[in-house]
Amino acid sequence: MTTFTYAPAPESRAIVDIAPSHGLFIDGEFRPAADEAVFKTVSPASEEVLSEVAQAGAEDVDAAVRAARKAFPGWSGLPGAERAKYLFRIARLIQERSRELAVLESLDNGKPIRESRDVDLPLVAAHFFYYAGWADKLPYAGFGPGPRPLGVAGQVIPWNFPLLMLAWKVAPALATGNTVVLKPAETTPLTALLFARICQQAGLPRGVVNILTGDGSSGAALVAHPGVDKVAFTGSTEVGKAIARTVAGSDKRLTLELGGKAANIVFEDAALDQAVEGIVQGIFFNQGHVCCAGSRLLVQESVADEVLAALKARMSTLRVGDPLDKNTDVGAINSAEQLARIRELADAGAAEGAERWSPECELPSQGYWFAPTVFTGVTQAHRIAREEIFGPVLSVLTFRTPQEAVEKANNTPYGLSAGIWTEKGSRILWMANRLRAGVIWSNTFNKFDPTSPFGGYQESGYGREGGRHGLGAYLDV
Amino acid sequence: MPSTATALADVTASDAALRRFLHGLPGVDAVGLEARAAALGTRSIKTTAKAHAIDLAISMIDLTTLEGADTPGKVRALCAKGTAPDPTDPSTPRVAAICVYSDLVAVAKDALAGSGIAVASVATAFPAGRAARSVKLADTAEAVAAGADEVDMVIDRGAFLSGRYLSVFEEIVAVREACGDAHLKVILENGELVTYDNIRRASWLAMLAGADFIKTSTGKVGVNATPANTLLMLQAVRDFRAATGRQIGVKPAGGIRTTKDAVKFLVLVNETAGADWLDPAWFRFGASSLLNDLLMQRQKLSTGRYSGPDYVTVD
């Protein structure tokens, strides 16, 4: 009997029509960059050039901020219920066009269609619906009777969840009456540009949302622009620090959501099959391109061998390959640059003496790929236990007592998330009180919900996005 | 979990030891288990993979009739159906077994002579299992004497739920003995065990007692085979083989009616226990109406058109 191999089940890309070139979205329309500079965006799975995108310069940033400034009085002056109508309309359009958006996201980002279709897009729509619901209830949100918007929000987002990060930033900003200039990441601009078309389709007033594509220099110009009242950034700690320095001394508000090196802590009494699934979900979801990824597995010594054997068996079933195949679990690394960084850190792990293991898997010859990898025998001193890798690489450490687990988990400059796996409820609460992390999941991992605030400690940044707390970042309170 | 067979020898020495062992198995997180089963249900199985899966599923069916109104005629018709499920296409695989009540085993045995299809018989006061042990053993012995190749027994849920694990264990051992050369499938009746923790414990209990197969359900209660409880049992047989070297089969039964559902179960097998279990020797579907849907889907794959229920037999 032949083995049960799954035939390819590719999602059709015919649903999305990618224009050969894209302009900047300023004041309700698309226009080329003032100096007509462009760059190319490629599919990380095939290195195929998908489109040419305008590179925003200082002049374009200025035009976008002016457009947002001009639109601000009208937008913030609308009754909350009216703003809510626009947001509900956008949310519904996102749902209607979700397949198109999911395919485009997987093409531009390299993430599996299974995740963009089943995780990203439902959450994107949910965030717009959620904040639409808040727009007319701001006086009752606990910020006093008349909370005011800040003005123009300059938002810079990363490439790991292009559309989801857009939703996290744009939805609360618009609900609270701010206008927006958003810069998507250089390698993943396409879904933000399609979102701009959705804003047009929803009849959103001109200038309320502006989208500038470009590299780091465009983002730096946006953050530094004196017409920006609020800066929101999600990305690397290094860039976050540079932004904090730029903004320091001005009266701009700032929220930062930066890197992480989360501990996923498995106790001996955990539901082990589900814990193994959670470990996989924690680090291999979105190729590990997740700031809150559970990249450090802390497993109790008594079950370490058992958990590792089960983890390796489970990793052997991960399907790596074409992101548009509905059966793909792990897609492509977002860029050549990121792939080089992952390789460098993984090699450092092996050089430091940790034991490296990957399941047998055939990687495509074109594109940027990295096999799911686990390192055992890792110590707190190893680079792979300290630095954020932002790829499908898991470092495994062991512990003996809950106290030791807490100490090791907290022994990091980051503090974005943590996971606890145990069947003992009192231990979950004991641990949660001691772990320094913005989000603590128990018996699950990487779960997001618009009603739940998200943010970090220490070098993972400050401010909260999502939930009622997320409103506060866009209100003068 | 003990990693060697020797460690397992002691755990059935007393009720207390057995309870300690079964309660020491890792817990099951219901939310996580169901999420995993649902995620595997989204695998997209198309074209060649689908054709392979359909034929595999047909060859794994225990074609079943367990009605009070069963007649020898109905059983003979079912046997004919199992031998040549699609008379228009001789390349269609035959089913694995015909499953009947013990009084009809002889009829099935006769009808299936020379076909290579096994006769399975439910015994041990199926489906309630509420009879004296002597009655259950007699029921089993009669089925085997009539020629049953496989015996599907039900466990004593009352004893299990009241914590008398050793009693359940001993009964399975006794039935196993009464089976002789016949294969023993132990029905846990998941719907009455209610919690996933119980299902895992019952799976281990049955495997320790010598079951050749563990089976989800009788098909006679509200909750029968589900992707989640089957996934859990697949984890149990996988872990049991790792601990003892002994491979045990799994049989979901009840409520699996469509090709789509059957393929989802095969995906669960493939990605949980592994390809070693993708064989009628190690995985079965307890089903009656599933076969016709598989045949219709099979015809659709070969002709490109969906024929409809009038193009397959109703037996």
Image: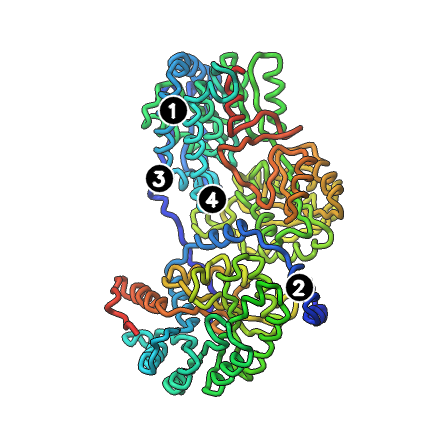
- Whether discs 4 and 3 lie on one chain: the answer is yes
At 52% from the left and 39% from the top, the residue drawn is A334
Q: CA distance from mark 2 to mark 3?
A: 59 Å
In the foreground, A254 or B15? B15
Q: Which mark is residue A37?
A: none
Q: Which mark is residue B19?
A: 2
The first of marks 1 and 3 along the sequence is 3
Mark 4 or mark 3: which is in front? 4
Q: Which mark is residue A16?
A: 3
Mark 2 or mark 4: which is in front? 2
Vertical relation: A221 (above or below) B285? above
In the foreground, A19 or A119? A119
**Which amino acid, by three-letter code, is at mark 3?**
Val
Q: CA distance from mark 4 to mark 3?
A: 18 Å
**Chain letter of disc 3 in the image:** A
Residue picked out by circle 4: A115
Q: Position of residue A135 (x, y in %)?
A: 42, 23
Q: Position of residue A244 (x, y in %)?
A: 61, 20
Q: Secondary structure at mark 1?
A: helix
Residue picked out by circle 1: A84
**Chain letter of disc 2 in the image:** B
